[in-house]
Image: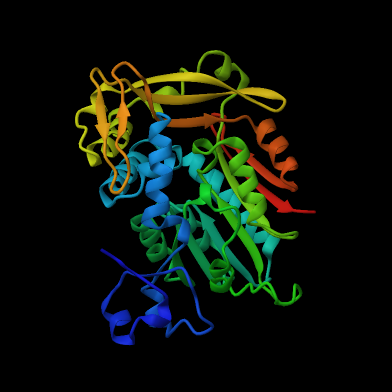
Amino acid sequence: MPLRCATDAIPPFLRRLNPFVISDALSPSVGSPEEEALAIWMDPSARMLPQLSRLHRSLQAGVVPAGALYVSPHQSMKWLALHEAWSPARQSSQVGSLYETAFHELQRVIGDQRWNLASLGCGGGQKEEQCLGLFRRQPEAALLIDISPSLAMVSRDRVSPTCAAHAGVIDLEATPMSPSWCRRLLAADEAGSESTRPRRVLFFLGMLPNMPVTTAWSLIRSWTEPGDLVLVSANLASESELRNGLLGILPQYDNRETREWVGAFFDLHGIFGVAEELTCDVEAVPVPGSTLSRIRFQWTPTEDRTVRLPGMAPVEWEAGRPITAFQSLRLTPSAVESLAQDADLTLRFQQVDPSGQEGVFLFERHG
C-alpha cells in the first residue's frame, strides 16, 4: 500500500526509496526537486474512508459513480485500451487537428506570459503532452489531477520532460474548490501579487460527459479566478442526432472495450460476467433552455446480489432492480456556451470537428 502522511514526517531516506509518497499537507519546504518529482499529492477527498463512504451511498442508490470506474490499475488499463480504440481524438485526424488548433489559439492568447497548468481529470495525459509540445514557452509548473493514481502518474510522466510536473489525486465531485496544496504546487499563493503570479490555465478535457451538469460547471468556477483561462472539451451531438436517438454515436460506446472497462468495476467486487449482460440505451436529460441526451449502461441482476465494502454495511441489490453502471452526456455547442456563461466564463474561441461530435472551447473567467 502507498504510504500516506505529511511529507515532513517522512525521513529523507524513505522519500528516496518510496516512489509513492502521498501527502495532503505541504510544509513551506517540500524537499528537493528529486524527492518532489516522486510524490503523488493526495487530497483528503481521495482517502480510503471518504471514498468508501461515497461509494457505499451511491451503490445503495443503484448507481456506480463515475470515479469508481478508474481507480484501480486494472481499470485504468481497460480505460486506456478503450480510449485508444474508440476515442475520436485518437481515431480521427480531423479531431486531432481540432485540438491542435485549440492549443495554438491558447498559445496565441498566453503569448510570452508566465503561466501554470492544472489539468482536472487528466486521464493518460496525451492531450497535455500534445499541447506542451507546441508551446514556445513552457508552463512554470503543471498539476495533473485524476481520481486514479495510476493515470495521474502516467500523465505526470508524459509532461515532466517539459516542465515541473506534479501528480495529484482528488475526488473532484467531492471537492468544492482548489485545495491550498494545489495552489502551493503551482506557485500561486493566495497572498501573492496578482501582477506577479503566473497566469493560470485550467484544462477540463473529457470531463463534461460523466459529471452532473451543475457539478461540472460549479467545479470549473470554483477552481478559477478572474483572468484565468479554461480549455473545455465536450462530446457533442447535433439537433438531428438528438432527435434520432444518437444512432450514429452509439457504436463508440456499445462495444467490447467499453463493456470490459465498465465490467471491471463489478469484477473488482466479486461479481463476474457483468460485461456481457450490460444493456445500453439513451435517455433524455433536461437542462436550462434545452433537452440533451445521455448514453447509459445498466445491469439488471437476475438474482439478489450483495456488495461488501470494508467497514461498511452490506449493499443489497435485489433481483430485477436495474443498476446504472455508466452514463455519458452529449451536449450541443449552444448548451456549452450557455452553461459557461452561467459560470462567469466568456467564450474566446471554439472549434467543432466536421462530424459535429467533438468540440473544444476556450473560455476566460470574468467576475
Q: Position of residue 179 (x, y in %)?
A: 56, 63
* Displayed quadrant of residue 351: top right
Image location of residue 275, percent across then percent down: 26, 28
Q: Position of residue 181 (x, y in %)?
A: 54, 69
| Looking at the image, residue 266 lies above or below residue 97 | above
Q: Quadrant of the N terminus?
A: bottom left
Foreground pick, 301 / 142: 301
Tell me: 221 left or right of 153: right
Seen from the viewer's position, the closer of residues 265 and 207 is 265
Residue 21 position in % (x across, y down): 35, 72
Which residue lies at the image location 75% right of the left edge and 47% below the top edge?
Answer: 344
Position above or below: 9 against 345? below
Q: Relative to the observer, which residue lies in front, 360 or 45?
A: 45
Residue under the point 59% across and 16% down: 240
Residue at 28% over, 48% down: 310
- Residue 184 appears in which quarter of the rendering? bottom right
Q: Is residue 353 above or below residue 232?
A: above
Residue 186: image quadrant is bottom right
Q: Is residue 360 visible in this depiction of the protein?
A: no
